[in-house]
Image (cartoon, rainbow, N blue to C red):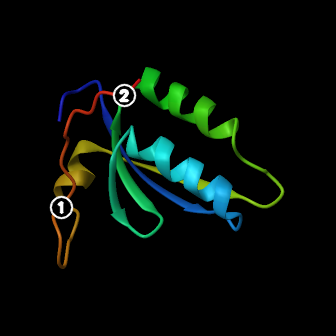
Amino acid sequence: MPHDTCCYVIAYDIPDDRRRARVHKILCGFGKWTQYSVFECFLTKKELVLLRSRLAAHLNEQEDSIRMYPLCQACVKRVLTVGGEPPREDRLFFS
């Protein structure tokens, strides 16, 4: 993992189908979908700002919840995975 990126585990709870689909699509451009409403994203500070901005445009703060948990490099190496793959950085290009 390059030193300028951080792994974020992003989980969301969005009751509205349309907003949830938009959020899912946005997150697909930034990281890997690992669980039903969980993504792993390796982001620079600039990418994190861009992601937060794009998500904010589609959220209803009264109903929706998105949590972003940063993991340091040492923590990423210690992630325990049962089934599936452990987190790894795949550079994605998005518009």
Observer-nearest residue: 18 or 92? 18
Which circle's residue, 2 or 1, is located before the other in the chain? 1
Residue in the image at 61% along x and 58% along y: 20
Q: Hey, what amino acid is under mark 2?
A: Phe
Residue in the image at 43% along x and 26% along y: 47
Residue in the image at 56% along x and 60% along y: 12
Relative to 5, does residue 67 appear above or below in the rendering?
Answer: below
Determine which residue is flagged by label 1: 86
60 with respect to 38 (left or right): right
Q: Dividing the picture into quarters, in which one does residue 13 lie?
A: bottom right
Which numbered marker is on residue 4?
none
Location of the C terminus by quadrant is: top left
Q: Position of residue 34 (x, y in %)?
A: 32, 63
Q: Residues within 10 Å of mark 2 (few under 14, many from 20)?
A: few
Q: Position of residue 10 (x, y in %)?
A: 47, 54
In three-dimensional space, the C-alpha distance between marks 2 and 1, rounded to whole angstroms, equals 23 Å
**How many discs mark residues in the rendered view?**
2
Q: Nearer the viewer's eye, disc 2 or disc 1?
A: 2
Location of the N terminus by quadrant is: top left
Q: Residues within 10 Å of mark 1 (few under 14, many from 20)?
A: some
Residue in the image at 23% along x and 27% along y: 3
Helix, strand or loop at mark 2: loop
Observer-nearest residue: 54 or 25? 25
User: Are the residues flagged by discs 2 and 1 in contact, CB closer than 8 Å?
Assistant: no
Observer-nearest residue: 59 or 73? 59
Relative to 65, does residue 94 appear above or below in the rendering?
Answer: above
Question: Residue lying furthest front in this view?
Answer: 18
Q: Hey, what amino acid is under mark 1?
A: Pro
Q: Position of residue 48 (x, y in %)?
A: 48, 31
Determine which residue is flagged by label 2: 94
Helix, strand or loop at mark 1: loop
